[in-house]
Image (cartoon, helix red, strand yellow):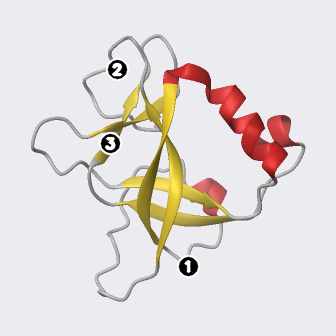
Amino acid sequence: QVLRTMLGRLPRAEAAIIAEGFERRRVPKYAFPALTMARGKRPGSPVHCLVLRDLSSNEKLIFDLFEGSLYTKKEIVARLLPDVAEPYTWAVTTPTVQEPEEPEAATARALAYVWAGRFALDSALWSPE
C-alpha cells in the first residue's frame, strides 16, 4: 500500500535476501522496522528484501524525500530468489527461506536505506507477526 500511495504504482520487484551484516529492528513507538548494521561481531540475520528494478529518477527522489535524514543509503549485495512468485507478500514474512547454497546464485548490488536516526532502535529483531 505504501509504495502504491507514494508512486501511484507497484514497481517490478524481485525477492532477495541480504545475508550478512544487517538486521531489521523495530523503530520505537512504531510498527515498522528499520534496516540497521548488525551489532558487535554478529554476522546479522537474513533479511527479506525487495530489489526494485524499474524506478525512474523522479521515483528515486520520492524515496529519498520519504526516508529523509533518518536513513542513509548504503550499497548492499542481495542474493536473488527467482522462484518466489509473489515478492511483495514474501518480503514481509518472517525469514525462513535459507540463502541459496550455490556459489553461482545470482546477486544484485542495490542501494538500501539504513537507519541513521538519532535514537536507538528496539533491541529485539523485528518480526511482521
Three-letter amino acid code at disc 1?
A: Pro
For marks 2 and 3, the one nearer the N-term is 3
For marks 1 and 3, the one nearer the N-term is 3
Percent x, y of residue 76: 42, 56
- The front one of 1 and 18 is 18
Of the numbered discs in the image, which one, if any, rests on residue 31?
Answer: none
Percent x, y of residue 72: 49, 33
- Classify residue 86 by image quadrant: bottom right
Res. 19 in view:
yes
Mark 2 to mark 3: distance in Å? 11 Å
Mark 1 to mark 3: distance in Å? 22 Å
**Residue at x-position 51% and y-position 16%:** 30
Q: Is residue 31 above or below residue 8?
A: above
Q: Is residue 126 above or below residue 104?
A: above
Which residue position is annotated with label 2? Answer: 121
Q: Is residue 42 above or below residue 69?
A: below
**Residue at x-position 81% and y-position 35%:** 6
For marks 2 and 1, the one nearer the N-term is 1
Percent x, y of residue 36: 36, 36
* Residue positioned most to the left: 41
Determine the secondary structure under disc 3. strand
Of the numbered discs in the image, which one, if any, rests on residue 82?
Answer: 1
Mark 2 to mark 1: distance in Å? 32 Å
- Classify residue 114 by image quadrant: top left
Determine the secondary structure under disc 1. loop
- Classify residue 116 by image quadrant: top left
- Left or right: 78 in relation to 120: right
Which residue position is annotated with label 3? Answer: 23
